[in-house]
């Protein structure tokens, strides 16, 4: 069994949980097995939390937040009974271990809101004993996945270069594909981002992370887009790494099985968040919010409702989708 790490060129995965509570919102948290279910129900009863497990297999969400998440954004199970009391999925997050064919892929989930902050100098994360998930992909998509990941692993990789590879255009420094910036602004301004972020089930962490994007979006002109590439190389580095993790760890494959669609969605958000956020820390938080929002079809299915809309966004072929 081969084990591949993400990032690939680093000696070790590095990460430290900063207890932001962001990951405990707008997610399905599975409760695995009868023993874990009984334990969570018992601990919930001690905390006065009724029916913490719904449908026999997942934690109950209230207003898009885990029923155990306190107003201080800390886990009440962890705080009262210790880290080991949480569901196994929570204890392991954001470490992901995937079984892909005959190999394992190990990495840190790109939707962790604070992963950027300990990416380079956090403590090493080890994976022995971690839960392993099989994440299947249509075999016809695997060459696409492999090619796109290799573009992102180049020493000089940038988001413009990556999007040009997706568009089938020659790579020209880190410039965006021809007309892409104009189309992206048109698509985002016509999308129901505000409507979706105001929904009850979205929780608070995604809207908070995407606040800079929401504020900037109405100020952009499709005829005169913000400049590219970003001035801060850390923004480029984290954008590339986040998109690469999204593909390598297949974090959206279950909802959007076309790898090029996943890649476009992630990279488009990485560009828009870079326009909206001047600092790497804010950028990383916004991009995590974007990737988390795009894990369900709730938003992306309205931003890119058809394959024609996807082709229009990346290549400018055909007509723009109608504003919603
Ligand atoms: S059980 Fe605790 S760690 Fe797990 S999702 Fe709920 S609040 Fe977060």
Image (tube, rainbow, N blue to C red):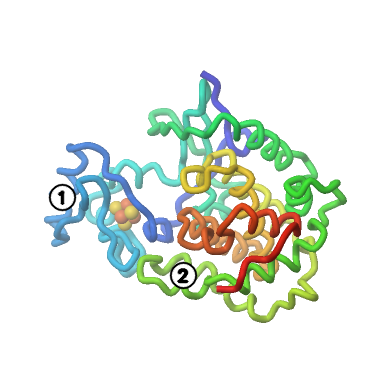
When the figure is inspected, residue 150 is found, relative to residue 294, above or below; the finding is above
Determine the residue located farthest toward the top in the rendered image.
1
Left or right, 320 with reference to 109: right
Q: Position of residue 235 (x, y in %)?
A: 69, 58
Name the quadrant containing residue 73: bottom left
Which of discs 1 and 2 lies nearer the camera? The answer is 2
Q: Nearer the viewer, residue 193 or 4?
A: 193
Q: Residue at x 77, y 45 (%)?
A: 165
Q: Position of residue 55 (x, y in %)?
A: 21, 49
Q: Residues within 10 Å of mark 1 (few under 14, many from 20)?
A: some
Quadrant location of the C terminus in the rendered image = bottom right
Determine the residue located farthest toward the front in the rendered image.
318
Q: Residue at x 43, y 28 (%)?
A: 128
Q: Position of residue 116 (x, y in %)?
A: 58, 54
Classify mark 2: helix, strand or loop. Answer: helix
Q: Nearer the viewer, residue 58 or 112?
A: 58
Labels 1 and 2 touching (C-beta < 8 A): no
Residue behind mark 1: 41
Q: Quadrant of ligand 1?
A: bottom left
Name the quadrant containing residue 93: top left
Q: Nearer the viewer, residue 133 or 305?
A: 305
Viewer can see residue 187: yes
Classify mark 1: helix, strand or loop. Answer: helix
Q: Position of residue 81 (x, y in %)?
A: 22, 50
Name the quadrant containing residue 190: bottom right
Residue 196 is tagged as: 2
Q: Residue at x 54, y 49 (%)?
A: 110
When the figure is inspected, residue 212 is found, relative to residue 251, above or below; the finding is below
Q: Residue at x 49, y 38 (%)?
A: 125
């Amino acid at each position: 069994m081969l084990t591949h790490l993400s990032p690939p060129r680093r000696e070790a995965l590095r990460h430290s949980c900063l207890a932001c509570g962001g990951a405990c919102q707008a997610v399905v948290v599975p409760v695995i097995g009868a023993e874990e279910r009984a334990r969570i129900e018992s601990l919930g009863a001690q905390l006065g939390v009724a029916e913490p497990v719904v449908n026999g297999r997942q934690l109950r969400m209230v207003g898009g937040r885990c029923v155990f998440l306190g107003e201080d954004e800390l886990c009440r199970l962890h705080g009262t009974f210790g880290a080991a009391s949480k569901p196994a999925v929570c204890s392991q997050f954001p470490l992901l271990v995937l079984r892909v064919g005959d190999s394992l892929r190990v990495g840190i989930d790109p939707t962790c809101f604070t992963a950027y902050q300990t990416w380079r100098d956090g403590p090493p994360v080890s994976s022995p004993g971690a839960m392993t998930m099989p994440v299947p992909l249509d075999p016809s998509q695997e060459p696409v996945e492999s090619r796109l990941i290799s573009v992102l692993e180049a020493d000089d990789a940038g988001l413009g270069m990556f999007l040009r590879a997706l568009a089938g255009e020659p790579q020209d420094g880190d410039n965006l594909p021809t007309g892409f910036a104009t189309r992206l602004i048109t698509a985002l301004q016509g999308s129901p981002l505000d409507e979706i972020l105001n929904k009850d089930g979205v929780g608070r962490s995604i809207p908070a992370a995407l606040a800079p994007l929401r504020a900037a979006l109405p100020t952009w002109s499709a005829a005169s887009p913000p400049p590219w590439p970003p001035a801060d190389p850390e923004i480029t580095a984290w954008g590339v790494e986040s998109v690469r993790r999204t593909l390598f760890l297949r974090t959206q494959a279950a909802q959007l099985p076309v790898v090029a669609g996943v890649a476009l969605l992630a990279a488009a958000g990485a560009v828009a968040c870079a326009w909206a956020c001047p600092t790497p820390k804010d950028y990383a938080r916004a991009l995590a919010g974007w990737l988390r929002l795009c894990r369900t079809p709730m938003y992306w299915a309205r931003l890119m409702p058809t394959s024609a809309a996807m082709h229009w966004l990346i290549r400018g072929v055909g007509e723009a989708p109608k504003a919603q």
